[in-house]
Image (cartoon, helix red, strand yellow):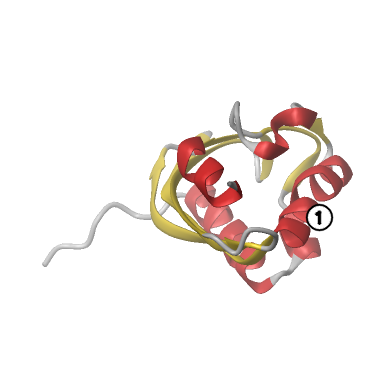
Amino acid sequence: MPAGPPESESHRIVSALYGAFARGDVPGFLAHLDPRIRWNEAEGFPYSDGNPYVGPAAIVAGVFARIAADWEGFRVVVGEIVGGDEVVTMLGRYQAKHARTGRALDAQCAHTWWLRGLRVVRFQQMVDTAAVARALE
């Protein structure tokens, strides 16, 4: 079977981001972000109240710390990474259990990453917010 097209540097960076997130390697994750990154959570998602998060410290406090407090076993299941050199999208799922309700989350998600050079300068989350709301009820 012939090999597919070679993986771009942007695809490798985005894959490394998900690997660092899965390992809980926050410094490794943040190393790929531009200091002025603009990060947006999906409208209707619980953490969209801080949109846009500007800079890594805002993302850690406004998104990652809240995920750690609100969800047990939160993970991003990476399905496919598509796109070009400057814009890459990950299609996947969120899986977790809500800490307060005990309800399971298994929601479709997509993340779009904009890169300049070897750094992420912008992020946009898309997620099935109805599935998230059911886990919060």
Q: Residues within 10 Å of mark 1 (few under 14, many from 20)?
A: few
Name the one closer to the observer, 98 or 55: 98
- What residue appears at the point 64 percent right and 34 percent down from the top-left corner? 41
Q: Is residue 66 above or below residue 110?
A: below
Residue 92, percent across and down?
A: 42, 52
Residue extending farthest bottom: 23
Q: Is residue 75 above or below residue 57?
A: below
Q: Is residue 107 above or below residue 84?
A: below
Q: Is residue 72 left or right of residue 61?
A: left
Q: Is residue 52 above or below residue 60?
A: above
Amino acid of disc 1: Ala
Residue 127, percent across and down?
A: 49, 39
Q: Is residue 120 left or right of residue 114?
A: right
Q: Residue 44 falls in which quadrant of the image?
A: top right
Residue 130, percent across and down?
A: 47, 37
Q: Residue 46 falls in which quadrant of the image?
A: top right
Q: Which residue is mark 1?
A: 65
Residue extending farthest left: 1
Residue 54 visible, this orientation: yes
- What residue appears at the point 84 percent right and 38 percent down from the top-left corner? 55
Quarter that holds the N terminus:
bottom left
Element under disc 1: helix
Residue 79, percent across and down?
A: 37, 56
Name the one closer to the observer, 127 or 60: 127
Q: Is residue 15 left or right of residue 69?
A: left
